């Protein structure tokens, strides 16, 4: 995949003398997340502030990888950097109108047989992982704000359905990979992150089975009413038909099985 950098970010990176792969790779900064040593290489993230040409700053995350690859159909032997899948999936979600990260730069190089890859994304300012944000809202009296609670469920269901309508399955749709914030008027916004495992599916239903199962099983803060509202909104119906009821029962069985595995110490 070729280097990617939107025009507005080219100007910002140039202003900070970081408008090349080499300059970004050599960037000195403390690790925001310690490098992950696996897949025969490493992958780590730093968080930096960039000065804007007209004043002010913009915060970004820089993910860098070396020999952190996975095998694909197009690269069955040497593999490709996992970041390459991530940027490809971010752009696919953007094209589908699904809320996700804003990429500022992507590049990859193979030097003397070593894969190096890098992805720069804008910080999701004001957003928090769904699991943490939901607990905060609960502590702040979330249960007393029924309208906001319902609006959040509806917004999330619409975003997930839009993703599946384009036959895209997140494949790791856990609450920690859904970022949430409330804007000034109190409306919720969501963003999907951690997209390395996202894949195209033959049908939207196949995408739904895996993603809704993951979200349902791991959303321990959901009430049964929340879960039912989400499914109805996702399916676009006020009353579940026979197919909807079958899907509801499938999700319930999966949740019970997941709890049994948790009790046994198996994830």
Image: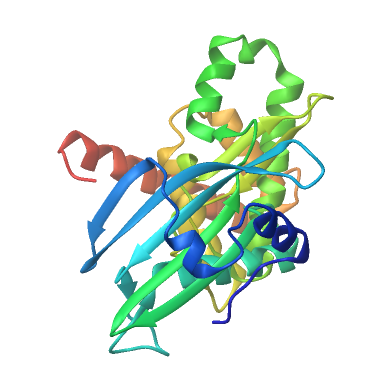
Above/below status of 227 relative to 134: below
Relative to 100, 211 lies left or right:
left
Above/below status of 138 relative to 263: above
- Horizontal and vertical percent position of residue 259: 29, 37
Relative to 113, 156 lies left or right:
right
Q: 186 and 17: which one is in front?
A: 17
- Horizontal and vertical percent position of residue 190: 66, 42
Residue at 55% over, 25% down: 134
What is the quadrant of residue 25 in the picture?
Answer: bottom left
- Horizontal and vertical percent position of residue 251: 46, 48
What is the quadrant of residue 5 in the picture?
Answer: bottom right
Relative to 196, 150 lies left or right:
right
- Horizontal and vertical percent position of residue 42: 28, 60
Residue at 64% over, 53% down: 100
Above/below status of 174 relative to 197: above
Q: Residue furthest left?
A: 264
Asked if residue 63 can be seen in this view, the reply is yes
What is the quadrant of residue 167 in the picture?
Answer: bottom right
Q: Which colour style is shown?
A: rainbow
Quadrant (top left/top right/bottom left/bottom right) for the N terminus: bottom right
Residue at 63% over, 46% down: 191
Number of callouts in the render?
0
Asked if residue 198 can be seen in this view, the reply is no
Residue at 81% over, 24% down: 184
């Amino acid at each position: 995949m070729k280097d990617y950098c939107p025009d507005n970010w080219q100007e910002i990176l140039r202003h900070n003398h970081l408008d090349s792969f080499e300059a970004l790779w050599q960037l000195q900064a403390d690790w925001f997340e310690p490098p992950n040593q696996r897949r025969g290489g490493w992958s780590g993230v730093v968080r930096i502030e960039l000065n804007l040409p007209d004043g002010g700053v913009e915060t970004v995350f820089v993910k860098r990888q070396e020999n952190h690859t996975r095998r694909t159909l197009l690269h069955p032997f040497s593999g490709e950097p996992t970041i390459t899948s991530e940027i490809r999936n971010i752009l696919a979600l953007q094209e589908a109108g699904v809320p996700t990260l804003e990429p500022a730069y992507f590049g990859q190089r193979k030097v003397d047989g070593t894969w190096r890859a890098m992805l720069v994304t804008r910080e999701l300012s004001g957003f928090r992982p769904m699991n943490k944000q939901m607990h905060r809202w609960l502590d702040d009296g979330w249960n007393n704000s029924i309208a906001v609670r319902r609006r959040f469920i509806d917004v999330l269901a619409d975003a997930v359905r839009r993703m599946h309508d384009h036959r895209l399955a997140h494949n790791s749709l856990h609450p920690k990979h859904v970022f949430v914030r409330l804007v000034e008027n109190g409306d919720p916004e969501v963003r999907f992150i951690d997209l390395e495992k996202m894949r195209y599916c033959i049908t939207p239903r196949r995408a739904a089975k895996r993603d809704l199962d993951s979200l349902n099983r791991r959303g321990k803060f959901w009430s049964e009413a929340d879960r039912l509202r989400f499914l109805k909104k996702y399916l676009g119906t006020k009353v579940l038909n026979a197919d909807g009821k079958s899907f509801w029962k499938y999700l319930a069985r999966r949740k019970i099985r997941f709890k049994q595995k948790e009790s046994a110490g198996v994830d």
